[in-house]
Amino acid sequence: MTSARIWPRTQFFDLFPETEHPIIQGGMVWVSGGKLAAAVSRAGALGLVGAGSMKPDLLQHHIRKAKALTSKPFGVNVPLLYKDVRLQLQTALDEGVRIFFTSAGSPKTHTQWLKSHGAVVVHVTSTPELALKCQDAGVDAVVVEGFEAGGHNGRDELTTLVLLQQMRGKLHIPVIIAGGIGSGAAIAAAFALGADAVQIGTMFAATQESSAHANFKNAMIDAGSSSTFLRMKKLVPVRLLNNPFSENIRLAEELCLSSENLNQILGKGRAKAGMLDGDLAEGELEIGQIVSTVASIPTCEELLAALIADYTLARNRLLNSLQS
Ligand SMILES: Cc1cc2nc3c(=O)[nH]c(=O)nc-3n(C[C@H](O)[C@H](O)[C@H](O)COP(=O)(O)O)c2cc1C
């Protein structure tokens, strides 16, 4: 069966008509450069360059790298947190990017300006209330992310399954669901509950093309069912693989240390040290709960093929059970 026939014809395909599979590789600081985004888009899903860790010149480099590796559309994820943000967005526009997944910050600030340049704008959020605000701000779609997800999370600790049900019928724009998706069966469940597409981070971090350090990738394979924790709730909550640094944060949080003290423990450069440079003891290792299912480090093409095969099985199982 061709892929066009296995997927429900959701609004995702109106926004991204050239993308074959309704699967987005989430932007990931230090992990999703041009190589990963291009590999995902080349394999028929939608790849995103994660601009969070990049100055504008480095972002330009990664966009050019992705363009050299694929002719398929890809996008850029820009957390709206940093002082360079308008310059990052302008750099991506100048390089011809017209797909923007923004996160953190307010979607009001840049959405209309990006759209005036012909861009599709999707904002990442973690509650139905914020998703409605995104729709009011004029975004084309929202990613709604449960707190199973790797990276920075919402404060309300809503799970993906609950969010999906809370979102039903609330928005007229497409809803992309993220957090804890690591199998085709989970993708089928997301569609059954009304999602238009899924966004996946952790499983793409564990691919050959991701820039995660080999030590980090090996730690992903070794991770058990309870290896991640939500830390730094007083600052910006973030889901981390457990390690000595994460333990220190736990102890500091148990002692109710102030935000200033937590910031001192965090210091500078932890995320790069952990994820890019492979410091498994003192680095920050952002990853989602679904890391417990990572058993190997496939290519993006292999990962997508496995997800699609499992999705097809789940879909057929459901169709058969409805017919019997
Ligand atoms: C290592 C890592 C870094 C991330 N960095 C970002 C980021 O820079 N911007 C962002 O919007 N989301 C970020 N995320 C979240 C992902 O884009 C995605 O929404 C999330 O990983 C989905 O949940 P999953 O990890 O369970 O698949 C990050 C996730 C991971 C695992």
Image (cartoon, helix red, strand yellow):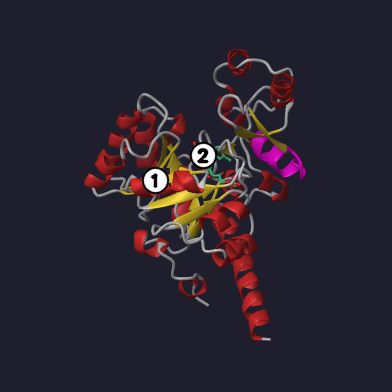
Residue at 64% x, 42% y is 288
Residue stretch in magenta = 215-227
**For this rendering, which residue is in front, 30 or 172?**
172
User: Reading the chain from its start, which is encountered first: label 2 or label 1?
Assistant: 2
Q: Residue 102: which quarter of the image?
A: top left
- Report helix, strand or loop for mark 1: helix
Numbered circles on residues, count: 2
CA distance separating discs 2 and 1: 21 Å
Q: Which residue has dot 1 on it?
A: 134
Front in this rendered view, residue 20 or 16: 16
In the image, residue 236 sits, relative to residue 219, either above or below, namely: above
Q: Position of residue 139 (x, y in %)?
A: 35, 48
Please identify, in this view, whether the residue under mark 2 or under mark 1 is nearer the observer: 1
| SS state under label 2 | loop
Position of residue 36 in the picture relative to residue 230 (left or right): left
- Mark number, residue 28: 2
Q: Position of residue 171 (x, y in %)?
A: 42, 57
Q: Position of residue 223 (x, y in %)?
A: 74, 41
Q: Is residue 142 left or right of residue 214?
A: left
Q: In the rendered structure, which amino acid carries the disc numbered 1?
A: Cys
For disc 2, the neighbor class at 10 Å (few under 14, some 14 to 19, many from 20) is: many
State the residue at coordinates (33%, 44%).
137
Ligand 1 within 8 angstroms of badge 2 C-beta: yes
In the drawing, does residue 30 fall left or right of residue 234? left
Residue 147 place in picture, x, y as percent: 61, 43
Decide if residue 268 is in sight here: yes
In the picture, residue 318 is in which quadrant? bottom right
